[in-house]
């Protein structure tokens, strides 16, 4: 990447934005929560809304509104016109109404904010030192099914935002091979398993996950009337000798391997290779940092890496595709197809070497 030319005064200004970034973030969350951004969008078009009328309409003190809106204006979240009326800016509009931004904001606030305070310790120890802010688990995955409900909601909305959108596009690709038995490794809530069964009336899906998540996934399968076609097996890939059995036509891993270090990924892939025959497909879906069209998407993935460091497990990240291609080769797999799916994802279809 080429070096950016920037004047010293601009650099100093950018440095202050970073120094006070948490203030701007918390201001945004507060303006959303108090309904100020909604109100400005709905009523601000016609000459803006004054602090006095906002205060009356939303029962918030003028003092409170002044401190929030002043920094929001400097941060280009709102605009103030010459008559003193506030309007929502384009940035403010996206902060309030864009679904991706909403998933990212809530994930940052509810899941990561407090834990990130322990980032330096996490880096030094190679442990998710911030996770203690959420609960007493060795990794976040043991705790997923027990997280406080608002935290759990934000975790799942973030996770689902970045996977649900590609499931519809992925299904026809997965079922070209007409699998009769599909193993969903890291099946989470069972969403993909249910979609598979609805897509193909003959497929049987077996979900592999930690006990808490597996119970959730199987009860979701039951609620969808698919108890007979979706089964499950508890597994902890970090235990001594995790094993999956033979019999899968397709092994599916969607946004699963990024939950592990490179050494662990290799162990998981080698384990899967042992269960595969010459026709089994192993499909990996990931959002790779070196496969993003926009810098902004890469930035989101790099931030997600820090969630893994500080909160999830202390040793995984969002990887580059080149790193995965290396691991695939080392595990005894060969890449058969390299497909782009949706806006952010890559699908690797592999077979046993
Ligand atoms: C980020 S979620 C991905 C979920 C889903 N496949 C998707 O695309 O949305 C990762 C999944 O891996 C599971 N997982 C994480 N660590 C695990 C471990 N040590 N053993 C078994 N499963 C694990 C989690 O419980 C979770 O369901």
Image (cartoon, helix red, strand yellow):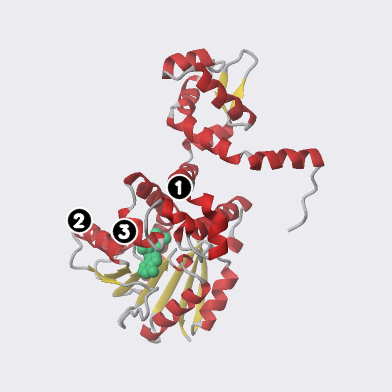
Where disc 1 sits, the SS reads helix
Q: Which residue is mark 1?
A: 107
Q: Which residue is mark 2?
A: 223
- Would you say the residues marked 1 and 3 are in contact, meaning their CB atoms lie under 8 Å apart? no
Q: From this view, report whether residue 168 is shown above or below residue 243.
A: above
Point 58% across, 66% down: residue: 320
Q: Is 290 in front, or is 24?
A: 24
Q: Is mark 2 within 8 Å of ligand 1?
A: no
What is the C-alpha distance between the residues marked 1 and 2? 27 Å
Q: In the image, which disc is placed on residue 170? A: none
Callout in the foreground (1, 2): 1
Q: Position of residue 281 (x, y in %)?
A: 41, 77
**98 on left or right of 154:** right
Q: Is 145 in front, or is 98?
A: 145
Q: Which residue is mark 3?
A: 189
| Residue 344 appears in the picture as rendered | no
């Amino acid at each position: 990447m080429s070096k950016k030319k920037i004047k010293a005064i601009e650099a100093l200004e950018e440095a202050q934005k970073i120094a006070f970034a948490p203030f701007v973030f918390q201001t945004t969350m507060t303006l959303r929560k108090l309904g100020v951004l909604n109100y400005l969008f709905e009523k601000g078009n016609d000459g803006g809304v004054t602090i006095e009328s906002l205060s009356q309409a939303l029962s918030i003190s003028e003092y409170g509104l002044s401190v929030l809106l002043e920094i929001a204006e400097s941060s280009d979240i709102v605009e103030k016109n010459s008559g003193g009326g506030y309007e929502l800016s384009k940035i403010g509009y996206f902060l309030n109404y864009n679904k991706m931004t909403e998933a990212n904001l809530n994930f940052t606030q509810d899941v990561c904010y407090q834990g990130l305070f322990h980032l330096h310790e996490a880096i030094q120890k190679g442990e998710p030192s911030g996770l203690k802010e959420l609960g007493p688990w060795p990794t976040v995955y043991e705790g997923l099914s027990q997280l406080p409900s608002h935290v759990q909601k934000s975790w799942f909305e973030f996770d689902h935002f970045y996977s649900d959108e590609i499931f519809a596009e992925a299904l026809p690709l997965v079922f070209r091979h007409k699998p009769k038995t599909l193993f969903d490794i890291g099946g989470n809530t069972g969403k993909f398993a249910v979609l598979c069964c609805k897509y193909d009336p003959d497929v049987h899906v077996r979900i592999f996950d930690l006990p808490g998540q597996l119970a959730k996934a199987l009860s979701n399968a039951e609620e969808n009337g698919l108890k007979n076609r979706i089964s499950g097996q508890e597994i902890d890939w970090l235990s001594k000798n995790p094993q999956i059995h033979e019999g899968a036509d397709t092994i599916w891993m969607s946004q699963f391997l990024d939950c592990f270090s490179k050494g662990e990924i290799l162990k998981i892939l080698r384990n899967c290779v042992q269960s595969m025959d010459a026709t089994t497909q192993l499909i990996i879906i990931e959002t790779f940092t070196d496969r993003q069209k926009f810098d902004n998407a890469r930035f989101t993935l790099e931030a997600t890496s820090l969630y893994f460091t500080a909160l999830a497990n202390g040793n995984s990240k969002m990887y580059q595709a080149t790193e995965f291609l290396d691991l695939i080769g080392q595990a005894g797999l060969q890449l058969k197809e390299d497909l782009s799916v949706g806006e952010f994802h890559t699908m690797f279809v592999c077979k046993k070497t």
